[in-house]
Image (cartoon, rainbow, N blue to C red):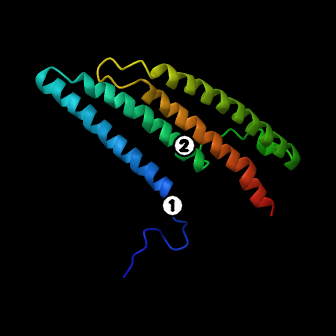
């Protein structure tokens, strides 16, 4: 007998979404282990491992960026709609188009800046672990590029589908 992992009628999560959630869960677990180990080492032995501090910082950057992309995909970011709720449908549509355009421009600038940081970080290394700093900058590049793609999908493809 097969027991479905989602309630009847609920859409199944895409594989990419499951992978993102697994990545975030593993990242969070590693962060908890690193920070807890350091707390115990400091409390019990008066010392800690600097490697864990640097590792937890890197993992936190990736966790936040991945969570931001998942939140953007679900359209669950905070929004300020005090003004939008008080205007007519045409003005609301125009404001939505303007907000999308501004978001695309800002995300494009973040992609460019993150790309520059990745390039700059290829030959710069973290002081303790020694990983290329491009790995940390790549989190922002991934986040901004993924959000730009989601913005395009929501603005163009989803609206086109909704009209038909």
Tell me: 29 left or right of 149. Answer: left
The percent position of residue 114, horizontal first and vertical second, equals 56, 26
Comparing 48 with 39, the one in front is 48
| Residue receiving disc 1 | 13
Say which residue appears at 56% left-offset and 22% top-offset: 116
Quarter of the rendering containing residue 42: top left
* Real-space Cα separation, disc 2 to disc 1, in angstroms: 15 Å
Tell me: 149 left or right of 125. Answer: right
Comparing 104 with 85, the one in front is 104
Q: Residues within 10 Å of mark 2 (few under 14, many from 20)?
A: many
Could one spot residue 78 in this view of the protein?
no
Q: Which mark is residue 132?
A: none
Q: Which mark is residue 69?
A: 2
The percent position of residue 17, horizontal first and vertical second, equals 49, 53
Comparing 80 with 47, the one in front is 47
- Quarter of the image with the C terminus is bottom right
Quarter of the rendering containing residue 113: top right
């Amino acid at each position: 007998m097969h027991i479905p992992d989602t309630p009847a009628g609920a859409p199944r999560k895409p594989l990419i979404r499951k992978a993102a959630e697994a990545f975030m869960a593993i990242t969070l677990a590693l962060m908890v282990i690193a920070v807890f180990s350091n707390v115990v080492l400091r409390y019990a032995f008066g010392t800690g491992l600097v490697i864990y501090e640097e590792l937890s910082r890197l993992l936190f950057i990736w966790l936040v960026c991945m969570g931001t992309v998942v939140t953007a995909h679900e359209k669950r970011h905070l929004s300020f709609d005090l003004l939008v709720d008080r205007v007519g449908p045409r003005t609301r549509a125009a404001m939505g188009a303007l907000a999308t355009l501004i978001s695309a421009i800002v995300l494009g600038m973040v992609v460019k800046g993150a790309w520059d940081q990745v390039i700059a970080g290829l030959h710069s290394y973290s002081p303790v672990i020694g990983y290329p700093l491009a790995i940390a900058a790549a989190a922002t590049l991934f986040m901004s590029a993924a959000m730009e793609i989601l913005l395009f999908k929501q603005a163009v493809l989803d609206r086109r589908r909704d009209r038909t």
